[in-house]
Amino acid sequence: MKQNDLVGNKKESLNEGKGSSSEEKNIGPHLKPNRIETLPSFTLAGISAVTSNEAELRNDGKIGQLFEKFFIENIAGELGADIKESGHYSCYFDYEEMDLGSYEVMVGVKVQDEVQVPDLDSITTFTVPAAKYAVFVTERGPIIEVVQRAWANIWQWSRQKGVERAFTGDFEYYPNGIDPNDGQAEIYIAIK
């Protein structure tokens, strides 16, 4: 299976400005998106599970296990993708009760719509719909920690007056060559 090009210029935007500007860190009570971006639909393939924020917060979650399985079992390789060149995604969709209930989470890679995904029982595909996104760039650091902090701030941001999440499909993008101990990711939140 072939790997489609990156969405927009994610690779370039993540590698620019590696300094310590307040916009890059993007944490704290005044969190705002780094930018608003409209993207066309694209398809992801990978492995998925159903979880909830409550389960993830009480250490009964599945997200960490999905990432571990994705890398240990070389799921990207099974799909014919090279994440060292293209990066990978974590996508959240099929929300019940917005962010209060369960949702499906997938760790995967971007694939071409017309390319057939191998017939593997464990592989899920999801077409991220065309949407307008609030894009948040995490601070640089241990990737698990900086992404968790960014999500905590995004939940606060999403409850502000005037913010309307669409819940059609949100995703994290991890660029090629990301260092898990000193990395930076982008989080895309679908908005109305």
Image: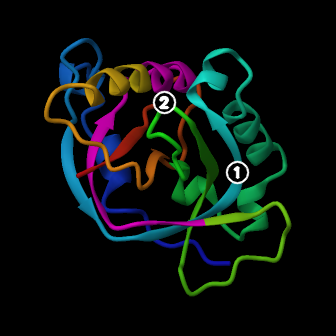
What residue span does the magenta drawing correspond to? 126-149
- Give the labeled residue for mark 1: 48
In x, y percent, where is residue 51?
66, 37
Q: Nearer the viewer, mark 2 or mark 1?
A: 1
What residue does disc 2 label? 183
Identify whether 179 is placed above or below 115: above
User: Which of the marked residues, 2 or 1, is nearer the chain's N terminus?
Assistant: 1
Please name the residue shown 46% across and 47% down the image. 171
Q: Would you say residue 162 is visible in this rendering?
A: yes
For label 1, count other residues whose C-alpha is less than 10 Å away and answer few (under 14), some (14-19) or many (20+).
Answer: many
Is the Cβ of the residue at disc 2 closer than 8 Å to that at disc 1?
A: no
The quadrant of the image that shows the N terminus is: bottom right
Q: Quadrant of residue 61?
A: top right
In percent of the image, x 43 and y 26: which residue is there? 151
Identified by mark 1, the residue type is: Ser
Q: Residue at x 73, y 41 (%)?
A: 66
Q: Residue at x 30, y 36 (%)?
A: 136
From the viewer's perspective, tell me whether residue 36 is left or right of residue 47.
left
Q: Does the magenta portion include 135?
A: yes
